[in-house]
Image (cartoon, rainbow, N blue to C red):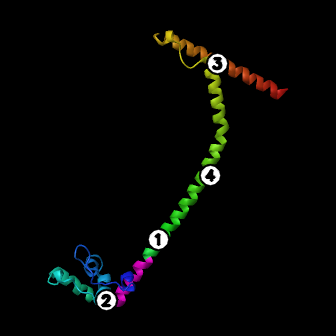
Amino acid sequence: VHFLVSAMADVMALDRWGNSPLVDALWASSEVAAVLLKACDAELPRSLADDEAMLSLVEGARSQNMGVVLGKLRLRDNIRAQVEDAALTKQLELAKIYGKLASQLGSLRHALQPVCQTIMEESARWIETYGLVPDDESSESDGSQDLDDLDDMIAMTEADNVRASAAEGAASSG
């Protein structure tokens, strides 16, 4: 309403459904309709001039005390402003939280790079040492040989780990 009035808009203009701002206001808010009726001399469109329901709504809007109406509209504006402020505050809080999360994820990624590099190097070494693809003969087997090969590979890996631990222990004590 404030926008319409301050922009000196035609309060009698009809929308694509043939309704004026007054008709929309009558259905939505009797306070807004009261302002349009009293401050802007708005009237019902001719097509609704004989509509009993609309005439009743117009009478109800006209009978309102403008001091009370303006108080209600100010209260609505204040509540709307508080809700907008609260939403903005929440958005800022979320932005801070997401900023911290992004920073922590970046730190985590940075910290994990050496681990990932080690995994890649060890995987490449393991594949080079033990192979990745079975030979043609074992692919036709019943799978029991594959399990034996797997057991052998696990045992060799465990032996490598024991040797590496022993070497580390000797290096740190010496």
Viewport quadrant of the N terminus: bottom left
The stretch drawn in magenta includes residue 132: no
**Marking on residue 103:** 4
The Cα atoms of the two marked residues, 1 and 3, are separated by 64 Å
Q: Which residue is mark 2?
A: 40
Within 10 Å of disc 4 (Cα), the crowding (few <14, some 14-19, many 20+) is few
Return the disc, 1 or 4, that comes first in the chain's sequence.
1
Return the disc, 1 or 3, that comes first in the chain's sequence.
1
x and y percent of residue 9 in the render? 34, 84
x and y percent of residue 131 in the render? 59, 18
Q: Which residue is mark 3?
A: 129
* Nearer to me, 17 or 162: 17
Asked if the residues shown at circle 2 and circle 1 are in contact, with their CB atoms under 8 angstroms apart, the answer is no
Return the disc, 4 or 2, that comes first in the chain's sequence.
2
The Cα atoms of the two marked residues, 3 and 2, are separated by 90 Å
Q: Which residue is mark 1?
A: 84
